[in-house]
Image: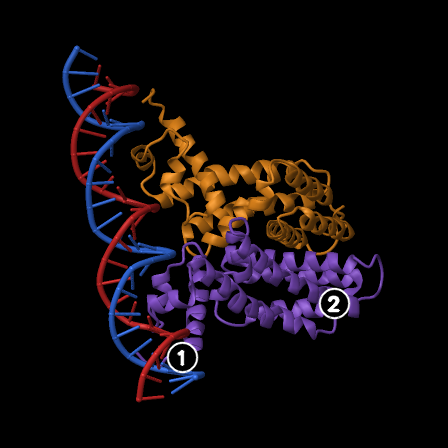
Chain colours: A orange, B purple, C red, D blue
Amino acid sequence: MAAKRPAETRRRIVASAFWEIYRQGFQSSSIDRILDGTQVTRGALFHHFPSKQHLGYAVVDEAVAPWIDERWITPLAGAGSVADGIASTVNAYLDAGPDEIIIGGCPLNNLIQEMAALDEGFRVRLDRIATAWRSTVTDLWHRTATPAGSPDDAARWAGFIVSSIEGLLGAAKLARSRAPADEAARLLVSVIRTAGAG
Amino acid sequence: MAAKRPAETRRRIVASAFWEIYRQGFQSSSIDRILDGTQVTRGALFHHFPSKQHLGYAVVDEAVAPWIDERWITPLAGAGSVADGIASTVNAYLDAGPDEIIIGGCPLNNLIQEMAALDEGFRVRLDRIATAWRSTVTDLWHRTATPAGSPDDAARWAGFIVSSIEGLLGAAKLARSRAPADEAARLLVSVIRTAGAG
DNA sequence: TTCAATACATACTAGTTGGTATGCAATTCA
DNA sequence: TGAATTGCATACCAACTAGTATGTATTGAA
């Protein structure tokens, strides 16, 4: 046993748990498999987290949220328009990283479908992430779109856009190919432009 | 033990398995819980299905597919326009049945997110259902939309529309409310109309 | 009516699950 | 430096898992 660095131990558990949960889903994830590869023992894990459920919550807060943040929210915040922001974040997402990310789907969406109906703790945490994403789109819309229609339009569009992105990512997962996501994204972007946010 | 009616026994297994899988997901569904309530025993189940996986396949083919068929595909086939068809199927879906259907999400989408990356048998079966849905939208588009743009436009729009519906159903699940789905659907329909399919 | 195939029913098993009990080592603070 | 407190390791456990072995009852055809 090396030196005791509790923060580092905890970080490794959460990181490994994120991938195990990403691949298997939360319920079918296994503590033993989370531990595999890491140099962490069962005792250490249950010292840091009272239960698998709490570990799951930590994964959402400390791994899924940053994942969405860096891939969608942060780049979007600096975009010149909603259409440009959506086009470039979707492209960057589909371009970047291994196929596993296309085939495995969006970690946020995966957990929403699996856990939102089953566990309120998961639900509120996941909702927090989705809300932050939508808010960023809403702000961007307000800042850059040609003002027309009711002031709630931006929020409505943001809801539509974010849910559409989750949908198109699911289509790619089903097809094991980025093609359907690419096509749907192009349509989504063109539709945003004609709405005056291009 | 009552009279032996194998077809009825099998039907009851698939029906019960559908709900258990709908609620828990496939991997976390339990044979014992599937059997609970039904008057079927373990032996009967494993007589009709060689494994849980094969039962899962049967559920997709014989329960999920009809579910999508009767709620989306069939009504859509008789619609007067794409916009009208989408508006009325979404509304009917959100109106009909218990809240469980809003909170529980779309059985097709649930299984896509959980199983598409893990099991090719599930993936192709789920893809078959989604493809049938998209084809129906494509045909409707061809029949009723004002002809403009390339001939692939209809298929592209169909892909976008179906994935958007799955996305907006996911938003309702996350919010435990039909409101976000309603708003996103209204935007989707208006966007379809401006594209000439209204 | 016999016989074979089908349709179940019961009991069991090997493996996996999340979680705990307990002990020791490293760190921190008085 | 001594004494808590924290961090971690090992061994264990009860519950649950899918699946099997084996038996019997029911069916349909000859």
From where the camera sits, is residue B47 visible? Answer: yes
Q: Is residue A85 above or below residue B73?
A: above
Q: In the figure, residue A77 lies in which quadrant?
A: top right
Give the spatial CA distance, label 1 vs label 2.
40 Å
In the picture, measured across the screen, residue B176 lies left or right of residue D22, that is right
Q: Is residue A103 left or right of residue B25?
A: right
Q: Which amino acid lies under the numbered mark 1 shown in the image of this protein?
A: Arg
Regarding residue B106, the answer to whether it shows in the image is no
Q: Chain letter of disc 2?
A: B
User: Which comes sooner in the sequence, label 1 or label 2?
Assistant: 1
Numbered disc total: 2
Residue B5 marker: 1
Front position in the image: A63 or B78: B78
Q: Neighbour class for label 2 at 10 Å: few (<14), some, many (≥20)?
A: some
Which quadrant is home to the C terminus of chain B?
Answer: bottom right
Give whichever of B171, A181 is nearer the camera.
Answer: A181
The answer to which of B3 and B168 lies nearer the viewer is: B3
At label 2, the amino acid type is: Asp
Residue at the (68%, 59%) spot, across then down: B161
Q: In the image, is B146 to the left or to the right of B1?
A: right
For residue C24, what is the image quadrant?
top left
On residue B172, which mark appears?
none
| Residue C7 position within the rendered picture, expressed as x and y whole percent measured from the top left | 38, 75
Chain designation of label 1: B
Residue at horizontal 65 percent and vertical 64 percent from the top:
B132
Could you say where residue B95 lies in the image, as x and y percent from the top left?
A: 55, 71
Label 1: which secondary element: loop
- Residue B143: image quadrant is bottom right
